[in-house]
Amino acid sequence: MEKNTAIQEREKMKKIPPGERIKSFKEIESCLSKKQALGEANRCLQCINPSCTNGCPAGVNCKEFIKKIREENFQGSLQAILEQNPLPCFTSRGCNSEAQCEGSCVLGKTGEPVSIRALERFVVENSELKNINSDTSKNSVAIIGAGPAGLAAAVEFRKIGINGKIFEKKSHLCGLAADAIPEYRIPKKVTDKQEAWMQKQGIEIEKGFKAGEKKTISEIMNEFDAVLIATGESCAKKLDVKGKELEGIYYWNNFLEEYCHGNGKKANGKKCVVVGGGDTAMDCARTALRMGFETTIAYRKNLEFMPCRKKEYAEALEEGIKFEYLLSPEEFSGEKKLEKIKFQKLEIKKEEFLPTGQAVEIEADLAILAIGQEFDETVFKGSMLQGKPPKEGISKTDLHGVFLAGDAINSQKTIVHAIQSAKNAVREIQQFIKDKKQKNGKEPEHGLQRTDVLLGA
């Protein structure tokens, strides 16, 4: 009975109804109250072998941070999270918890799992991000990119006493978390808070620096003991379809960077079609809906294969977004401006999606193409890595002392997987520096011998 009461209390958490939330970019969910958080934390069974921690890619000790909440030690709870997750500001809002920690919760097998992400957010909003106290060594690493992977790496390096300097091509930090996640999911105040905290840590940051153009990776290597490339996948996969040059056709990155914070004129009565079925397609569709477009998602497979989060799909459906399946774009048409999209109809045969030879047209004033992401290889320009795309799951590159982290080597393009990837790369770099020191019999000097640069030894 006590657990049921706690669930009922948690469900009182304010959530903007669909009819209201499509009118603005206000954050959909509010934070748990203290009473709600304590009730939810007390539902936790405090398992001897907590499966929730095993379900977290970053390895957060969920049992411990929830225990601290039960003790009303909220600052201690945040510290328990920060031991493994340096970016709780992001994960407490943008994490796919239902498939990870909450999806692994024992209570979820017979009922409602503990709302771990909501508890994490409560802790973040009711505690203070403290400064990292660590003695730094002479060793230094260049971190290219200030998205979640780059930021996480900088914090992890700081913890172990290595100086990590961030190089970011834009005028602000946080990458796609700031530029492409809609305001209703991660508000700008959250990325601003994360950036302000990073600035306080004494981590050196150089903005307006585009690696591969201002300096090559090889040139950067001469100044550091190692280089970590964490530039993510900020480029959109292109679609080679007739009429693609018409006005009114966007790729997801251009559209979200321009409109995800609620900018733009209202487009009442106009029609938008989003091509794609992942979380990015959902972000685009729900953003367009809030701008006033009648929005449809066209996906080339069926619902069973749609890769987006179930939560995102359910909320999009609630908000009135239409879904069309088994459609592949074939042609955009209109007089200078987009008017219609012609799709090839597909069918399923032995788990393959094959063209039927039939076509269907959908009217559209706006088309957003969200069919995938790509790594920007400009960063490799002028080095032996040029023309060699990153390899799935492998952080070490063919260029001695250069490593990768983040979406470029992750099949799952999520914030928490970017953190996991960054932590793995930091461990590899720490070992690389240690091995180099042992080989030289002294503290490694910045940079590499020219033969290393040329041969990738």
Image (cartoon, rainbow, N blue to C red):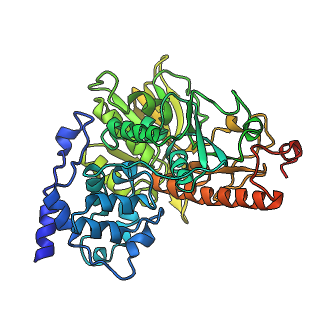
Q: Residue 15's spot in the image, x, y percent? A: 19, 49
Q: Residue at the location (36% across, 47% down)?
A: 323
Q: Position of residue 315 (x, y in %)?
A: 28, 50
Report the side of 215 relative to 254 (left or right). right
In the rendered image, the residue lying farthest to the top is 336
Q: Which of the 4 image quarters holds residue 263?
A: top left
Identify the residue at image location x=45%, y=72%. 54
Q: Say whether residue 361 is visible.
A: no
Front residue of this view, candidates 343 and 261: 261
Residue 383 in view in this figure:
yes
Q: Residue at x 30, y 29 (%)?
A: 291
Front residue of 438/18: it is 438
| Percent position of residue 312, x then y | 34, 51
Along the line of sight, the residue nearer the viewer: 256 or 198? 198
Q: Is residue 420 left or right of residue 103?
A: right
Residue furthest to the bottom? 48
Q: Is residue 283 left or right of residue 440?
A: left
- Give the mark count: 0
Residue 70 quadrant: bottom left
Q: Split into 4 quadrants, where in the image is the N terminus? A: bottom left
Task: Name the spot of residue 314 as percent of width and height, x first.
Answer: 30, 53
Drawn side of residue 402 relative to residue 350, left or right: right
102 to 145, vertically: above or below: below
